[in-house]
Image (tube, rainbow, N blue to C red):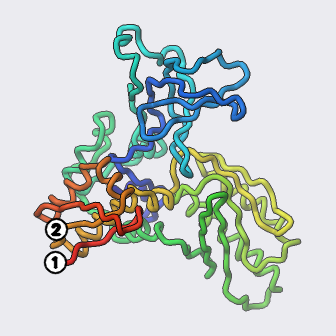
Amino acid sequence: MHLAVAEQGELVDFALWRPGAPDHVGDYFQARIEALVPGMGGAFVDLGLDTAGFLPLPKDAPPLTQGQAITVAVTRAALGGKGVRVKLATPECAIPPADSARQGSSRLIATGPTPLERLAALWPHASIVVDSPAAAALVPPALRDRKQQGFHALPEDIAAACSELEETDVDLPGGLSATITPTPALIAIDMDAPPTQGVLPKQTAQYAANKAALPALMRQIRLRNLSGALVIDPAGLAIRKRQALLPPVQEALQADPLRPRCLGVTALGLIEILRPRVLPSLPELLNSPHGRALAALRHIVTHAPGTTSLLVGSRILHALEQDPQAVADCTRAIGHGLNVVLTPSLPDLHWSLAQP
C-alpha cells in the first residue's frame, strides 16, 4: 500500500505499508537470550521470529545469562540479511507478573506504530484520504478524526511520482539527473549534467547546477529512505571545487527528520553522507522475497487476471505463506482462485505464470 504525503501537488513524503510483513520497529517482545557474544558487544535473542534479534550491551548493562527471559523493544528493522536490533525495555515495559505463566515462550507483547502512524506524527496537520473501504479499515481509531469523508483516488501526478520512486534514474532540476545504485556496503549516487552552455565559465556553471539540484536530490533520498553510507559523485565538477558543495549539502539535509550527517569529501571527490538505518529502504523492500511476491500478485491483477497458477521459487513461496492476506486480496481482485505452486526448477527468488 502506498502512503503519500502531498503538499500543493508535490510528493513530499512517502512510505510503503505492508501489513503482512511488518518491520517490527517499536514492537515489544518477550525474548530469551540465545547466546552471549562478548566479541560483538552484545547477545543474540530469540523473539519468536524467523531470525534472531541482536541486543547490543553497553559496559554498564545488567549481567545477563544464556536462556534468561527479558523484555526488549525493537529499535531497527531487519536490514541487509541481518535480524532486527533491539534494546532492553524500561522497567515499566517489562513483562507483568500476572503474565508469568507464559514467560517461557518468546512472543510479541505490544506493537509499535504503523507506517501510517509514523507519517501522521511527522505531518500532524495533514488530513488522511483513503481510496477504498479496505484502506479505511486500516486507519486506527486515534487517527479517524483526521480522515476525510468518502473515497478518493490518488491524483495522477502524485501516483506517477510514487511509481517513479521505484526507478534507479532520477530527474533533477536544471537538466541534471542521478543514478542510484545500492550495494551491500553503501549506496552510490552518480550525478550527470548536460553539456554547459552560456556565458559563465564551465566550472562556475557546473557548481551552480549541482548546488541547485541538491535539495531535490536530498528529497529523493528521503522519499526512498536510502540510508546507511551514501556517496555522491557530483556532475562535472573538478575535485578541488567540490568542498564548496558541503554547505549546501548540509543545508539541504536539515529538513530530514533522521538528521543525516555530511562527513565531507573523499580524496576521489565523493561526498559522504551517513543517514541512520532504522527502517528498510524502498529498494530493499521491493527486492526482498516479500516485495517480489507482491510484485507477482500485482502483475497478475494488472496484466494477467485469467491466471490460475503462480509458479514460484522457495523464498517467494515462504513469503506468500507468511502473508496469506495478500493472496486473498489477489483472488478477490481477479474473481477466482489462484494456486501457488512451488517449482524447484525456478531460482528461489523468481516466479512465472503457468501456461494455460
**Quarter of the figure with residue 293:** bottom left
N-terminal of the two: label 2 or label 1? 2
Residue 118 x %, y %: 45, 42
Residue pictured at 78% horizontal, 59% vertical: 247
- Distance, label 2 to label 1, CA atoms, is 8 Å
Q: Amino acid at mark 2?
A: Thr
Which numbered disc covers residue 356?
1
Residue pictured at 33% horizontal, 46% vertical: 19
Q: Secondary structure at mark 2?
A: loop
Residue 337 x %, y %: 13, 61
Q: Amino acid at mark 1?
A: Pro
Contact check, label 2 and label 1, Cβ < 8 Å: yes
Q: Nearer the viewer, residue 266 or 44?
A: 44
Residue bearing mark 2:
308
Note whether 43 is above or below 114 in the view shown. Answer: above
Q: Give the class, few, some or many, for how many residues have Cα within 10 Å of label 2's Cα (few <14, many ≥20).
A: some
Which residue ends up furthest to the front in the rendered image?
344
Residue pictured at 33% horizontal, 49% vertical: 128
